[in-house]
Structures are given as C-alpha cells and as structure tokens.
Image (cartoon, rainbow, N blue to C red):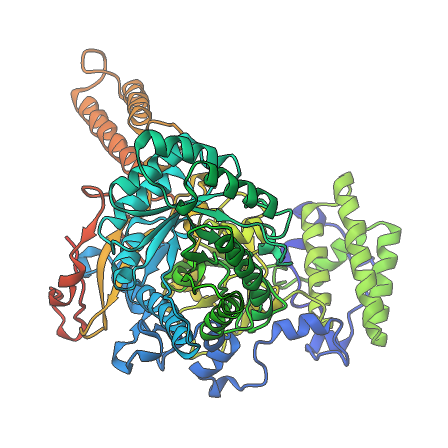
Amino acid sequence: MPALGCCVDAAVAPPAYANSPLGSLPAPPPLPLSFISGAPPPTPMSPTSASAGSVAADVDVSHWSPSHSASLYKIDSWGAPYFAVNPSGNVSVRPYGHATLAHQEIDLLKIVKKVSDPKSVGGLGLQLPLIVRLPDVLRDRLESIQSAFEFAIQTQGYEARYQGVFPVKCNQDRFVVEDIVKFGSQFRFGLEAGSKPELLLAMSCLCKGSPEALLVCNGFKDAEYITLALLARKLDLNAVIVLEQEEEVDLVIEISKKLNVRPVIGARAKLRTKHSGHFGSTSGEKGKFGLTTTQILRVVKKLEVAEMLDCFQLLHFHIGSQIPSTALLTDGVGEAAQIYCELVRLGANMQVIDIGGGLGIDYDGSKSADSDLSVAYTLEEYASAVVQAIRYVCDRKNVKHPVLCSESGRAIVSHHSILIFEAVSTSVSRAAPVAMSPLGLQFLVEGLTEDARSDYTKMTTAALRGEFETCLFYADQLKQRCIEQFKDGTLGIEQLATVDGLCDFVAKEIGASDPVRTYHVNLSIFTSIPDYWAIGQLFPIVPIHHLDERPGVRGVLSDLTCDSDGKIDKFIGGGTSLPLHEMVGGGCGERGPYYLGMFLGGAYEEALGGVHNLFGGPSVVRVLQSDGPHSFAVTRAMPGPTCGDVLRVMQHEPELMFETLKHRAEEYCGQEHGSNGGDGDTDDYDHGMANNSALASSLAQYFHSMPYLVVPSSCSLTAINNGGGLYYCNGEDYDAVVDSSPNEDEQWSYCYA
C-alpha cells in the first residue's frame, strides 16, 4: 500500500486551503516500509490483545468442525447432558438428558425460525428476544434429583424417604410451577413460599398435587401470613410454618387456637457453618435468617407451655446457594443433624429435616470449588453426602432417620430456560482508517503546534528504527496534543479525524490496537439478565448457529438501553470478550440474523428483571419434544409485553395517551388543510381527514407493539396481543397436531390458534 494510504481521507484540505501554494511546505516524513507493507513487527506490543484477536488460531479454518466450537465455548462441560452442537453447526437440545435418542434432539435454530417467522409463511410471528422453555428438561432435572437421593438412601441403608420442594421465588411463572407440581406428584414433591402472594400461588397449585406434598412456609410472617398458612391446613394441604423469628411462635400459638387448627411448626436454625462465597451471606451466626440455639430453646419452652410441642416437627437450615463442595455441605448438614437430634431429646415430635437450597450449578463448566460459578460435585455426590451425614449423626444418637427435604430451586429450573436474542449490528472500538492524500497530511502537519510537530517527527523516526514502544508513545502524545488544540478551537474537525486515523493505523500496525468489536444486541440486560448487572453473575452465552465455522472475531455485547451498564464484557472462563462470527450486512444480509443464546438462566432472572428504559420482558414459548419431522411442538406461545403494557406498569394510561395524541393529530390536520366551511377545498378537506385517520392508526399501532427493535429478517410482523396473545393447545394433545404448511419437506409439529 502507498505510504499512509490507509489513513483517513476526511482530512482533505478545505477549498480555501486547497488553493494555497503548498509546494513551499516541507513534505512530512513518511512512515517506515514495515508499516507501508503491512508486515508485522518483530514483537507484538500486547500479547493479550494479540491472542484476543485470533480465535482458536491453532485450528485451520478449513478444518473447523462443530466439535471445535463445542470445545471453544465449553458446551460439553456446562451444557451436558442437555445441550450439544449438532452436525449442522447449531446448538441442539437433548430434552431427556443422557437418555435422549438421536432422533429426539431438538435444533434450537429451528425453534427460533418457527417462532419468529411471519404467520403468512407458517410461523408464529413473535418478536425476539425470546425465552424458550423446555418442560422435558424440567421433568428430567426433577427426576434426576429424586433418583440421586433414592440411590443414596438405598445404598446407605437410610430408613426414611426423600421428598423435595421447589422454592417458587426461583421462578414464579404459572406454567413452570404447575409443571413441577404435575411432574413431581408421584414423588410427593411440594412447594416452598416466602411471601403471602407466593403462598397463595403454592396453595392453588398444590390442590392438584400429591396430598402428602409439603408446603413449606418460609419468610418473615405477620398475622395475615400465619392465618393464611393455617387456612391451608384447613384445606387439607400439608403446610408447615417455619419460624424465622422467635416472635412468630407467639402469633402461631394465638391464631391457631382462635381458628381451632393444629399447626405443623418448623424452625430455621442459624448454623455456625458458614459458606464464604457470595451466596453464603445468609449463613453463619450473623446471617439474615433463622434462630440461634438460645432462641430455639425458648421456642421449645413456649410450645411446651402451650401444650403444642408435638406440633414442632421440622428443622430447616440454609447454608447458602451454590455450595461449592461436599466438604462444606457435610459440615453444615452434620451440625443441623445434631440440632435435630437434640430437639428429639427435648420432646419435640420431629419428622423432617429440610436442608434448604445450595445444590449448585456449574455455570462455567470448570467443576471447581473455588468459584461462585461452579461446584466440585455431581448430583449423586451431593445426595450421598447429605444422606451419609444425617445417617451418621442419627445412628450415633439412636434417633429415627428423618424424612429428607431440600429446596433445590436453582438446580431444578436453571437448565430448562434459554434466552435467545439477535445481534443487530456491530462496531469496532477503533474505526478502520481509509485513504488519505499527501495533501491532506500536509494540511494536518501545518496546523499542528510546534510540540505536536515534534511528536510527529519523533513518531516517524522511532518507526524507522523499529522502536515500536517509543513510536506508540509519541503517537498517543500527538493525539492528546491535537485533542487539546481542537478544544481550544485552533484545529479543525477534519484535521482531528486525520490524527485519529493516523494513530489508529500506527497502533494496528504495531499490534497494539484493540481488536474487540461491540455487538449491539436486541435486548435489555436489566430486564432479561439482571443478575449480571446487579451481582456480576455470569451465564454461558453462545451463538446458537454457525458453529461449523470458525469464529473470526471477538466481541462484547451492548444492549438497547441508554445506560453505560447495559453491556456484557465478562464471560465464563475469565474472558473479557466472546468469540463471535462476522456479521455480514449488519446482521440482516445474506447470512440472515445472528442469534445468541444465554443458557442456565431459568432461576431468578425473570422475577428480578425490571423495566429500565421501559423495555419489557421477552416473548415466551413452551416447547415439548415430539415425534414429528423436527422433533418438537410449540404448545404455548406468548408475545412479550407491548409498549402499552410497560407504560401501564409505570401508572400511565395508554388509552388516554392515545386520545391526547389523536386530538393533537386532528388539530394539526385541521390547521394544515383548513375546514370544509372555509376557504379550503372539499378535496383538500377529505384528504386531510384521510391523513388524520392514517396518522391516528399509526399511533395506535405503536402502543400494541413490543419496545424492542423489529429486525425484518427475523420477523417482518410485529406481534400484537390477540385476545390476550395466547397461542395454546393441551400438552397431552400436541403430538396429534398436524402442521398446515404446504411444503411437505418442511412440515412442523406445532399448534397455535
């Protein structure tokens, strides 16, 4: 390339300057041949940046395969046994885990296509972002936890059963909770509530569950909460009131006598065992919840005086979420088992020990005990440690083995939900320089101060000598001096652009430029991934297609919100950027949209999400495995909240807002076209009314559309709520539904109304 031939052409001299005699000016010194030829310097300036700029450089692009992508993104580590990369280079779902047969795998891209395609071509016409719920995975998670405990109980000779509960705070979605109750009914699986609304939700759902299922009532309680829990017992629900504060026992005694209901009471113990990670803040003697041993003894005394000690039947504790190792688990469970046995000795009618949550998820696939993102055990090892610790203590104390209960919400629901979103455009941190003429370079140099000219000369001299660190130093110094000149008004914007291009060119040729791109995604992080923003929680994020191609760039993700925190620049594995594929045509070209998936986010994210910038939640579909040609059926689909919906959340009234805008439109059209009774022409009046009607109709449409960007290549129609926006068929009947698509080769098994 010619000297400086790749720099900015924005610095061409303005017309007045172009007519001046430039021949008398000394030509600026050229940059060295190593820059001109593009040859790399002997030693890169930044090994970190250099490695970040080449993705999986040890594998030739022509030999790249889906297995390489699976290894690069660690899908086989954090995703097993539910997620893999199929031969087409797309992420596939294995709905039954290890038991999934090859023909039962579900191509995630095909789900997105079916959901986002317009109804006119057989799709559902929903807009992204999208949550894909997989009830089959939910069922398998529940059955896997149950099986792990049953195996541990059988092999260790434990003489009681396991029956878990799902803490609804993890995901209060109606259909998620109903599925858990339905799938877990055969195991006596129950629910845990921590507030009055959650208790109402749990009571309603458990009416269709096992009569033996536990309804664990946690959280701080007032008289209303306790009354509601006692009414649950009147409805023949197996409700247990777990005392979080000592004062609650007085209310339980008083209200139960008024209602003539014999309660079942539990107590949450504040253990000494402490989980040191982020999620262990509720553990230890200074934890937020629970009773100390002194308070437990006072509770026992109060119940004894009230002749209700037989009602004390459950001991609950919680070490903290994401327990990293079985060593910590065994320590905490052993301490709780000692308290349980002491309560038996004191005369309490103890039946159940509730070990709380803590069964962790391996978010980064490292299987490490040294990170909040991972755990160093399997389901089977977790269950075995719990059973062994309790059996050991109870056998030593000659106490009957208690029923084992756990509240493993994160472990149950995390895998079953996938967030899909589009990358809509991309940008680089440094704009690629384009051609600049020698005249433009002379124009730049002439406008510099003496110090800046000196920096330019020293930069080029250092480049000629191969002193790249020195060259970069003077390039940065030159840029800073020019910025100050621009602020003072002594340097034009064309010259400043030239300096930017020149310095970017120098940094790129030396190997010190930042190769990381920003991918703009159709998403609100505050709404859909709030834990990332709030506590730095990382989730696996992976392109769901093109995985048979080697990713050629690295990028960070920037959302739609007008907030500097609306970006993701930390990823599992410790990276500050993510391997990504080139976006051709801004993501809407011949390659089509570029889809990314966030995995293992089924717990907490939906409940915690807000409406920052008035971006509502994503669309949601429920997908079951079927025996159709594409192995899946969409049994329920719900468009995301519209602009009108999110406005209502903030106390606005969309109907009144529309009337205000409609009235404004009528006034505008009336002023523009006159009226029929005045000087205006009748045709002009009719035309004005037609324009007014069209404008009002257009305004109304915006209230019914989602706040997110409409990407034409993925969904040419904006989903509008239709009778509640619910597409539905019974899950039992889904596999009998036949698609009406005219193309037999592209038949889909799905249903919608």
Figure check: 63 above or below 36: below
From the viewer's side, name the closer residue of 3 and 281.
281
Residue 217 visible in the displayed image: no
Where's residue 297, x and y in %? 56, 44
All told, the count of numbered labels is 0
Q: Is residue 169 left or right of residue 143?
A: right
Where's residue 131, x and y in %? 35, 56
> What residue is at 85 percent from the left and 49 percent from the top?
449
From the viewer's side, name the closer residue of 180 and 460.
180
Residue 282 visible in the displayed image: yes
> What residue is at 84 percent from the left and 73 percent from the top?
467
Where's residue 412, x and y in %? 39, 62
Which picture quadrant has residue 183? bottom left
Which picture quadrant has residue 188? bottom left
Where's residue 205, x and y in %? 27, 48
Which picture quadrant has residue 633? bottom left
> What residue is at 48 percent from the left and 63 percent from the top?
359
Figure check: 527 above or below 411: above
Figure check: 484 above or below 389: above
Q: Is residue 393 left or right of residue 225?
A: right
Q: Is residue 710 left or right of residue 483?
A: left
Question: If the image is split into quadrants, where does the N terminus sit?
Answer: bottom right
From the viewer's side, name the closer residue of 602 and 166.
166
From the viewer's side, name the closer residue of 726 and 144.
144
Q: Residue furthest top?
A: 678
